[in-house]
């Protein structure tokens, strides 16, 4: 499993608090924002990429210790961050992200009420959430590549790839042949970007394609796994 990067949590706490005060979150560039809307700077939002999975990790650990209240609190924090991310200007996957956040809120309620059957239910929910974020960041990467936005393309490609890795880790399943090949290609591009080696927009476009393969295959894999879990419930 890819090691987690520990980022400062102050920013997350502040934005979650802002979201609790006023919704929906409106980002810079939104026209005629209502007086009650909250404006979140893009730079602040970018610094929180990857934070939801850290909350999911802490939620899972709390649940394993039998601390349902703490687990639910962490799940709700992750949901709030995803809801904020859904407000990013031009988010193509806004509806999916908001639905994902609502599903996580329901999961948190179920944790508190003792209606979660096993840790596996949490793992699958967190995998679905990370995959929704991966799809969202992939869309942003695709747009950045089309706009010749080099910094944006690098940021979103990495964010999407990291979310795919996190989703895969939550499933605990071995990647398919196509997933593994796409993952290797994507990580090779990531290494180029990280080290400052020269990379082209053609490579970035292929990276968007690799991510699409991973997201589609993993989504199908999780759907199959979820159905098998449902059929096996009560055993």
Image (cartoon, rainbow, N blue to C red):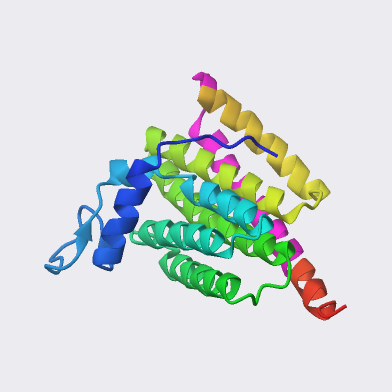
Q: Residue at x 61, y 59 (%)?
A: 126
Direction from residue 174 to residue 109 in the image, left or right: left
Viewport quadrant of the C terminus: bottom right
Membership of 217 in magenta stretch: yes
Q: Main secondary structure of the magenta part?
A: helix
Q: Position of residue 79 (x, y in %)?
A: 46, 62
Q: Quadrant of residue 112?
A: bottom right
Above or below, 3 against 137 in this view is: above
Q: Nearer the viewer, residue 42 or 145?
A: 42
The magenta span reads 195-223
Query: Can residue 89 be seen here?
Result: no
Q: Nearer the viewer, residue 228 or 232?
A: 232
Q: Residue at x 82, y 47 (%)?
A: 177
Above or below, 183 against 17 in this view is: above
Membership of 178 in magenta stretch: no
Above or below, 95 against 53 in this view is: below
Q: Nearer the viewer, residue 87 or 157?
A: 87
Q: Position of residue 209 (x, y in %)?
A: 61, 48
Direction from residue 14 to residue 58 in the image, left or right: right
Q: Residue at x 73, y 55 (%)?
A: 171
Viewport quadrant of the N terminus: top right
Direction from residue 155 to residue 219 in the image, left or right: right
Query: Can residue 122 be seen here?
Result: yes
Query: Among all residues in the image, which is located at the extreme right?
Result: 235
Q: Position of residue 9 (x, y in %)?
A: 40, 42
Query: Among all residues in the image, which is located at the extreme front?
Result: 66
């Amino acid at each position: 499993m890819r090691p987690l990067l520990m980022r400062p949590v102050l920013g997350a706490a502040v934005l979650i608090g802002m979201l609790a005060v006023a919704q929906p979150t409106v980002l810079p560039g939104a026209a005629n924002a209502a007086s009650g809307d909250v404006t979140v700077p893009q730079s602040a939002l970018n610094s929180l990429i990857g934070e939801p999975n850290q909350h999911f990790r802490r939620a899972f650990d709390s649940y394993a210790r039998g601390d349902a209240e703490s687990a639910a609190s962490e799940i709700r924090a992750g949901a709030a961050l995803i809801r904020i991310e859904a407000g990013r200007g031009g988010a193509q996957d806004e509806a999916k992200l908001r639905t994902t956040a609502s599903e996580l809120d329901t999961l948190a309620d179920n944790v508190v009420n003792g209606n979660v059957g096993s840790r596996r239910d949490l793992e699958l929910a967190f995998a679905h959430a990370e995959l929704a974020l991966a799809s969202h960041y992939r869309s942003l990467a695709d747009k950045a590549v089309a706009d010749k936005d080099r910094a944006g393309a690098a940021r979103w490609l990495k964010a999407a790839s990291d979310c795919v890795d996190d989703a895969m880790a939550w499933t605990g399943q071995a990647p398919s042949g196509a997933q593994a090949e796409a993952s290797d290609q994507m990580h090779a591009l990531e290494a180029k970007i990280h080290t400052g080696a020269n990379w082209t927009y053609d490579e970035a476009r292929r990276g968007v394609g690799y991510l699409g393969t991973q997201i589609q295959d993993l989504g199908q894999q999780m759907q199959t796994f979820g159905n098998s879990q449902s059929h096996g419930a009560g055993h």
